[in-house]
Image: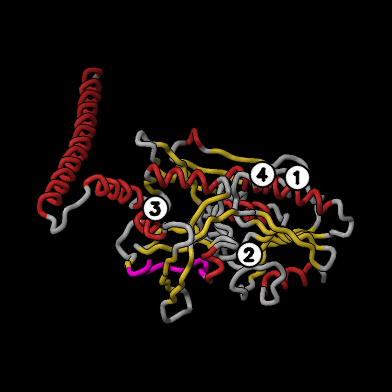
């Protein structure tokens, strides 16, 4: 009997090894096939090609087949990304992703050429100057949008609710993001607008809250996260913590169980339990959704506006030997309730459609902000 079990064990072992070897052989065959295709293109394609650029496109195509947020960054693009998270960069001022082969605007950033021209969250960029975007990778489209400061670009977009394509002429410029703007409404409402989550955002917000709290007339707050495309996870956690006494803020679940993580609030609500309304819209993504979702789940804030974008995944920047990097999705965000943000977003407690084209402080056409002010003052 013992020999029989040993025989079965060895049979299973060799069967398993055969499967592994077969899988590896399939991969090597595909690599050989790729080399053959590249060789045929190089010899037979109607125009001469740059093989290095073709390889970059192949790498990027592999990454973007995974999801809209994974991508390859050349050394130049990686350097630009590092500059962006510090709060100063050049360009149009939009956060984009790829959807169904078309570049989709996650959000225009306040006071940038894109927002001033009228680009909105959810717009699909179908043409850049005279070049059709369909069929191009996200990196190729972003490269087309890059250019010298002061130069012009024409974007053709498709927008929900509009039958015809819209065309916007935009001038590129150096963009310096002041991620926090504040005001006081009706003498008793502290207004904080956060436009991005860069490395300075938490420090700026804390400074403004401390100043507001010195004003004895302030009885409530509005945190405006509309058209905020997100940014650094660390800042989302820190800013959520400013308004919570305890409890989970966010968790991430990864392929590797050992890398699953949870973040919790420390004791101490900077606004001492005062009423808080958070404004969100379709352009609120990623870190914005973490803050809004955590405050909603803990019943610490009233969410007002529109359903958020639904970018609930964690991208890790992994440097490569060529000084470039890959942006790879390594986990997904989960709210304290256990709900995933990915492709679902965060829903408001009070749904109010936006009216203003952009969110200037106390605009008369800003339905969401005006409703929030009326709600707080009865």
Label 4, label 1: how far apart the Cα atoms are? 12 Å
Q: Secondary structure at mark 3?
A: loop
Residue plotted at (68% across, 59% down) = 193
Taking 159 as reference, is 289 left or right? Answer: right
Quarter of the image with the C terminus is bottom right
Could you classify mark 4 by the number of other residues whose Cα lies within 10 Å: few (under 14), some (14-19), or many (20 or more)? many
Residue plotted at (22% across, 37% down) = 23
Q: Is residue 332 above or below residue 185?
A: above
Write down the residue under mark 2: 348
Q: Nearer the viewer, mark 3 or mark 1?
A: 3
Label 4, label 3: how far apart the Cα atoms are? 28 Å
Write down the residue under mark 4: 238
- Residue lying farthest bottom? 163
Write down the residue under mark 1: 245
Q: Nearer the viewer, mark 4 or mark 1?
A: 4
Quarter of the image with the N terminus is top left
Taking 145 as reference, is 281 left or right? Answer: right
Could you classify mark 2 by the number of other residues whose Cα lies within 10 Å: few (under 14), some (14-19), or many (20 or more)? many
Label 3, label 1: how far apart the Cα atoms are? 36 Å
Q: Are the two marked residues, 2 and 1, in contact with CB atoms closer than 8 angstroms?
A: no
Which label's residue is closer to the chain start, 3 or 1?
Answer: 3
Q: Nearer the viewer, mark 4 or mark 3?
A: 4
Q: Quadrant of residue 128?
A: bottom left
Residue 225: image tag: none
Q: Secondary structure at mark 1?
A: loop
Q: Is residue 1 above or below residue 43?
A: above
123 part of magenta stretch: yes
Q: Is residue 98 above or below residue 366?
A: above
Q: Secondary structure at mark 2?
A: loop
Write down the residue under mark 3: 67
- Residue 369, image x, y percentages: 70, 69
Could you classify mark 3 by the number of other residues whose Cα lies within 10 Å: few (under 14), some (14-19), or many (20 or more)? some
């Amino acid at each position: 009997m013992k020999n029989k079990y040993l025989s079965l064990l060895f049979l299973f072992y060799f069967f398993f090894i055969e499967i592994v070897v077969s899988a590896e052989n399939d991969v090597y065959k595909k690599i050989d096939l790729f080399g053959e295709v590249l060789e045929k293109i190089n010899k037979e394609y109607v125009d001469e090609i740059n093989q290095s650029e073709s390889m970059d496109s192949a790498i990027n195509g592999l990454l973007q087949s995974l999801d809209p947020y994974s991508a390859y960054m050349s050394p130049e693009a990686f350097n630009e990304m590092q500059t962006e998270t510090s709060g100063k960069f050049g360009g149009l001022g939009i956060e984009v992703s790829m959807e169904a082969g078309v570049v989709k605007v996650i959000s225009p950033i306040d006071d940038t050429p894109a927002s001033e021209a009228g680009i909105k969250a959810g717009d699909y960029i179908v043409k850049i100057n005279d070049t059709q975007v369909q069929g191009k990778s996200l990196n190729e489209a972003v490269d087309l949008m890059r250019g010298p400061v002061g130069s012009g670009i024409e974007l053709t977009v498709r927008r929900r609710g509009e039958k015809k394509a819209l065309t916007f002429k935009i001038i590129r410029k150096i963009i310096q993001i002041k991620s926090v703007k504040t005001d006081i409404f009706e003498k008793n409402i502290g207004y904080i607008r956060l436009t991005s989550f860069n490395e300075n955002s938490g420090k700026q917000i804390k400074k403004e809250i401390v100043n507001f709290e010195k004003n004895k007339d302030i009885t409530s707050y509005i945190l405006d996260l509309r058209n905020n495309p997100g940014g650094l996870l660390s800042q989302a956690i820190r800013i959520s913590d400013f308004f919570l006494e305890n409890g989970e803020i966010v968790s991430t679940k990864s392929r590797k169980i050992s890398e699953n993580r949870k973040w919790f609030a420390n004791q101490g609500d900077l606004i001492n339990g005062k009423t808080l309304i958070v404004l969100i819209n379709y352009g609120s993504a990623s870190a914005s959704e973490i803050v809004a979702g955590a405050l909603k789940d803990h019943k610490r804030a009233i969410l007002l506006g529109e359903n958020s974008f639904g970018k609930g995944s964690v991208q890790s920047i992994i440097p490569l030997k060529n000084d470039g990097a890959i942006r790879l999705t390594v986990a997904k965000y989960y709210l304290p309730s256990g709900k995933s943000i990915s492709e679902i977003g965060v829903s408001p407690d009070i749904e109010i459609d936006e009216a203003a084209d952009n969110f200037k402080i106390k605009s008369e056409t800003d339905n969401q902000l005006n409703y929030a002010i009326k709600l707080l003052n009865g």
